[in-house]
Image (cartoon, rainbow, N blue to C red):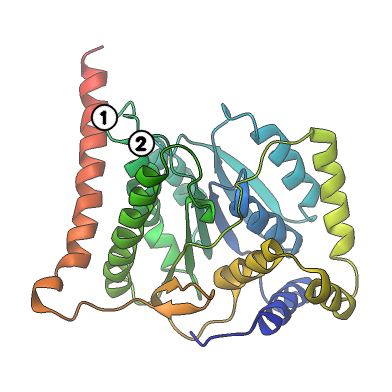
Amino acid sequence: MAKMRLDAIIKENANFEFQNRQDYNGRNSVCVFVGAMNGIGAKVLERLLMASYHSAVFYVLWNSSKSSTVYRKRVFDALLNRGCKLIYVEADDTRIADIDIATNQILAAEDKVDYLCMSKNIEEATVSSEGVQTETVVSYASRMRLISNLLPLLGRSQQPRVLNILNHGVRPTNGDYEGQKTIMQHTSVMTNLAFNHLATENPHITFILSPLGFDKAGSSQDTNAAVTMGVILKTWHSIPEKCRNVSERVFGTKADKILERHIYYLTGYCRESGAFHIDKRGDIVPNARPSEEEDKNRPEDAWEFAEKEWQLALATKVANQSSL
């Protein structure tokens, strides 16, 4: 992918919305989101809801036990345009079995997936009910499982895009800074390697890993304010494109600019498929291929590690059921 200036990215995003509004493209697009109840994932979903007009379908994997979900659902519902669908799929993404159930629902209902956006914060270091470390499952294994299960549908899209935002793009700030930093570094390396493997096996699909995000993941707000904000956002995007673009360039915050980039990573016109990552400047860079002979199996090794985690989790589930 070619490097692009921010003003060019903003223009591309506005053009994407304009074409969707005119029905030039975007008809019947299918989007899947996980980790979209707060942070950068929520903002990307909000923008895509506003930019979709013709029979688009959005699947949002969510955990109803989390307090922020009521607020976010009201925002999303307020932004959804007529003719589009928003489907919430209950799933605990620390459980591989839940990922399988959720993706089976999508596989049964759809014949393709165009966009898959994953943005989930790293969990505290605990053991899931399936016997796997939660931080490993959420940041790596469950995401790879989600991709693996949806590969048949992604392969049927004309321009499939997978965007994985590491830990909401949020830098660790709590007392276990070094521990979370190590997990993020490990996850980044493993994901890039796994994406290299997936891109080799699925040359039609674009895989992108992004470490960028907001300084904070975002917190729950009053639900009435949520609906009000949804109306404000819709009004803002009804302003003529040229006026809006000037305002965004002049008054846009760092968070606004990061959001614009992620919208482009997920939906922007792309001549290339393959595995990519986002560098410190926010540019999309192709993943380096292993140069040494002993390194050439590392992408496959990273993928096999994910498969072993799945097997462990599902075997624990079977063992627990048989003991009842």
- In the rendered picture of this protein, how many numbered marks are placed on residues? 2
- The answer to whether residue 95 is left or right of residue 201 is right
Residue type at mark 2?
Thr
Which residue is depicted at the point 26% across and 43% down? 310
Which residue is depicted at the point 49% across and 47% down? 120
Mark 1, Cα crowd under 10 Å, few <14 / some 14-19 / many 20+, is some
Mark 2, Cα crowd under 10 Å, few <14 / some 14-19 / many 20+, is many
- Residue on which the image places disc 1: 131
281 to 60, vertically: above or below: below
In which quarter of the view is residue 177 placed? top left
- Residue on which the image places disc 2: 134
Which residue is depicted at the point 55% across and 71% down? 265
The percent coordinates of residue 163 (x first, y second) are 49, 63
Q: CA distance from mark 2 to mark 1?
A: 9 Å
Is residue 145 in view from this perspective? no
Residue farthest to the left?
Answer: 294
In which quarter of the view is residue 288 placed? bottom left
Q: Which mark identifies residue 37?
A: none
* Contact check, label 2 and label 1, Cβ < 8 Å: no
Residue farthest to the top?
Answer: 324
Is residue 220 in view from this perspective? yes
Which residue is depicted at the point 13% across and 79% down? 292
The percent coordinates of residue 259 (x first, y second) are 65, 64
For mark 1, give the secondary structure. Answer: loop
Residue type at mark 1?
Gly
